[in-house]
């Protein structure tokens, strides 16, 4: 029987507390490119309008709450086992980088992955030496 198999039995040994804790926040990737930072959150089951993304004083807040219709749809079936489900979550990231252009933040949501793009300031050109005029 499936539940007696030693290879699959461990799948069902989590306590309710551990399962809730594992489901509370999505996994994150943080990437850096020459012109921007990208924050990726694995958040399946949401619609784009479910997300709230805010920037304030070097902190990025990402929150999501499933719409009532989506939450109802997900409750129509009973699960034998469930390891992922994000009805709602909130994460705050302290991003101390001084080169983020907050006014140009953008986001996309595709295939269950939320991507937040944090553009970097363009480096200022090196200051060239100025000639000094002589007083007469």
Image (spheres, helix red, strand yellow):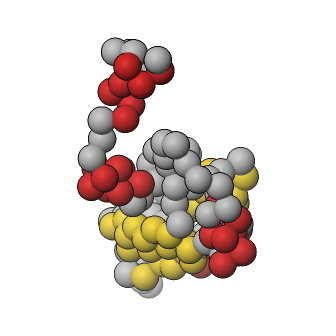
Residue 8 visible (yes or no): yes
Going 66% across and 71% down the picture, which residue do you hit? 72
- Counting from the top left corner in percent of width and height, residue 3 is at 42, 25
Of 134 and 1, the residue lying toward us = 1
Going 72% across and 74% down the picture, which residue do you hit? 69
**Number of numbered discs overlaid on the protein picture:** 0
**Residue 45 placement, left or right of 118:** right
Of 102 and 23, the residue lying toward us = 23
**Residue 110 placement, left or right of 93:** right
**Residue 84 placement, left or right of 22:** right
Going 55% across and 71% down the picture, which residue do you hit? 64
Going 71% across and 47% down the picture, which residue do you hit? 111
Could you say which quadrant of the image residue 6 lies in?
top left
Of 97 and 55, the residue lying toward us = 55
- Counting from the top left corner in percent of width and height, residue 114 is at 61, 57
Of 135 and 6, the residue lying toward us = 6
**Residue 105 placement, left or right of 29:** right
- Tell me: residue 80, above or below residue 37: above
Residue 39 visible (yes or no): no
- Counting from the top left corner in percent of width and height, residue 46 is at 65, 63
Which quarter shows the C terminus?
A: bottom left
């Amino acid at each position: 029987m499936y539940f007696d198999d030693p290879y699959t039995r461990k799948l069902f040994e989590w306590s309710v507390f551990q399962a809730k804790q594992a489901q509370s926040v999505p996994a994150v990737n943080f990437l850096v490119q020459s012109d921007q930072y990208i924050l990726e959150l694995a958040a399946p089951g949401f619609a784009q309008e479910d997300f709230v993304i805010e920037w304030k004083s070097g902190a990025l807040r990402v929150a999501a709450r499933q719409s009532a219709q989506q939450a109802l749809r997900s409750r129509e079936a009973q699960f034998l086992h469930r390891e992922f489900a994000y009805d709602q979550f909130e994460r705050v990231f302290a991003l101390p980088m001084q080169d983020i252009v907050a006014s140009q933040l953008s986001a996309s949501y595709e295939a269950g992955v939320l991507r937040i793009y944090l553009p970097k300031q363009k480096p200022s050109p090196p200051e060239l030496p100025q000639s000094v005029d002589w007083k007469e």
